[in-house]
Structures are given as C-alpha cells and as structure tokens.
Image: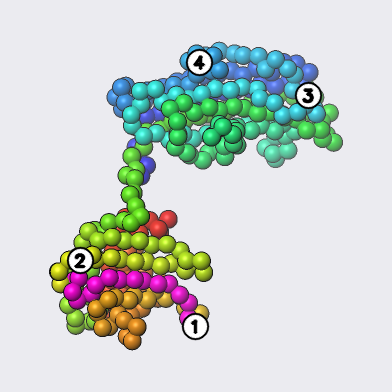
Amino acid sequence: MRKKLTLGLIALSFVLMAVIGTVAYFTIGFSSEDNIAKAADFDVEAVNKEGKVIGDAEFDLDEDLVPGMEKKEVYAFAVNKNNTTVPVEYQVNLGLSGDLFPDNGQSPINLEFERLKDGVWEQVELENTFHPEQDSEQFRVMVDWPHGENDIAYQGKTGSIHLEVVATQVDEEAEEEGPPYITGEVAFKATPHGSTRVTEGKELNFYTKDDGYKFIELSVGDGDGEFEKKVGNITVREYEEGGITWFQVYTDHEYYASESQMWRVRDSYLDFSEEGKVIFPKLNGPHLTIESEALYNWFTK
C-alpha cells in the first residue's frame, strides 16, 4: 500500500532544445532531496552508460533532428537501487513546451521512453508507476521524425522536453503464499435462529472455471471441532439463473446448505466492507464469512 507521505524522492530531469538543421542538446539535472529515510536504506542514483553518476551536464545528440529520420536512441541511462533496502517504485513524467511542441499535440517529433525488461525494450507509459524488478533498471530515450505534409512549418522552431524519473519509497507489500491459502476466521450461520459455527486456519482454494464463473473450496481437514462435525467442507459456486448471478454454498453436514436445501446469495449482496473478509450475507442474519486477504483481493482487485 502506498504511503500518503512520500518518504524518499529522487528526480532525474532532461531538457532538450532542438533546432532543425542544428545540433540538439539535453541538459541533465539530478537531485536528491527531502529524503527522510536513512541514507543506508534509501540510496537510489542515476548513472549514464559509462556508469558515472549523472550531474549537471550537457551532452551532444551527435546528429541533427531532421524530417524523415529513423527512430534512434538519443540517450540511455540506469537507475540503481544500490544499498536501498526499502521498497521503491518509479514513475515517469514528461512535459513538452515551445513552438516545436504546440498545445494541440501536432508536433512532428515522436519521443518514446523505454525500459529494458527481460532482455526486451518496452515502452513505458508516462505517469504510470512500476516497481523495479532488478537492482539496476535500464532506460533509454528514443526519438524519430516521420515525414509529414507540414514539416516546413517547423523549420527553425525550438522546443523543450522535460523528462522526469521519480523514485519513491513505498510500503512493502506482503507476498501471499498459496494456493492453497490458509484462512483466518471462518464463520457460518445457516439459518436466522441457528448457531454460528466458527473455525480458523483452514485450507482455501479458489479459481475461475472454464465457463467464467468463480469456484471456492474450503477444506476443514480431520479435526473434531464443532465446525468440522456440524458443517464440514464447504464449496461455493457462482452461476446465473433468471438473469441473476448467484453464489450457492454447499457443505458436507449442514442440512440447510446441501443439494436438497438451497443456500445461496445474490452477487450484488456480497459484502466487502471489512478489509480482508468476504461475506456472503442472507436476509435476517444467516451468513458465510471467510477471512482471507487472498480471497478478498481476488474479488475486489
């Protein structure tokens, strides 16, 4: 879960000034500020192809930006986690300004930002966040200028590209083990005036069948508690009837949730108001409640 207060911030900015028929330059600025995490824990840096930490500098694109140019890599760099032990996420932001990049979005210049993932360069959607999968994440800036009918209109015009990569410390997400998953508390009340049977720590499996409907299996094991004796194993199946989607509950031992006695809940009645709990409620009190972060996320995310 992302912290509302950013604990660490690192920004890498590029400014490109492009003039047709001349050489274009990037101005690179690097800063690390407002970092209230310990230095030993948050130590992200950006380096160029030679492995040198990026500071304030200019570099030459080596070639002019001209109409008809093929897509080319104009800059490559890496963001290193170094000794960072806290979880981080990266975000890419892009700002365009100047006559070469009019507000109507009709610029002849195409600029893409790519990330190397599993040996393949993939385009990064700007302003999206993603979690680094390696200690060193490789990036590159790609530029091309396809021929257009109005290229002459941009002769001699200039524009600025402000590209920012932000690394932010975030809360660590606990990895869910399974399947099978182990539940927290499980409670089943079959009738309005019946008893509520409760157990916990049971194996849980869930999946989507080939027909697209959900299916849930709860195994209580060989215990001799009241839940095991009075309820037993539980299965929940999703299906549609009469234009309504239902979740029907079957148990090994509870008469009111069996093949002969239908115990079901409309999908619109499912209750996710308690974090980590999926509740199948019926009118006047009966319910099946399963405490499982994995199951809750399966339904809600």
Question: Which amino acid type is marked by label 1?
Answer: Gly
Marker disc for residue 222: 2
Q: Residue furthest left?
A: 225
Question: Which amino acid type is marked by label 4?
Answer: Gly
Q: Which residue is mark 3?
A: 66
Q: Which residue is mark 1?
A: 242
- Residue 215 position in % (x across, y down): 41, 67
Could you tell me which secondary element the residue under label 1 belongs to? Answer: loop
Characterize the local packing of mark 2: few (<14), some (14-19) or many (20 or more) Cα atoms within 10 angstroms: few
Q: CA distance from mark 3 to mark 1?
A: 64 Å
Instruction: Name the N-terminal-most of marks 2 and 3.
Output: 3
Marks 4 and 1 close (CB-CB < 8 Å): no
Callout in the foreground (2, 4): 2
Instruction: Name the N-terminal-most of marks 2 and 4.
Output: 4
Q: Which residues are magenta?
A: 227-242
- Residue 271 position in % (x across, y down): 34, 67
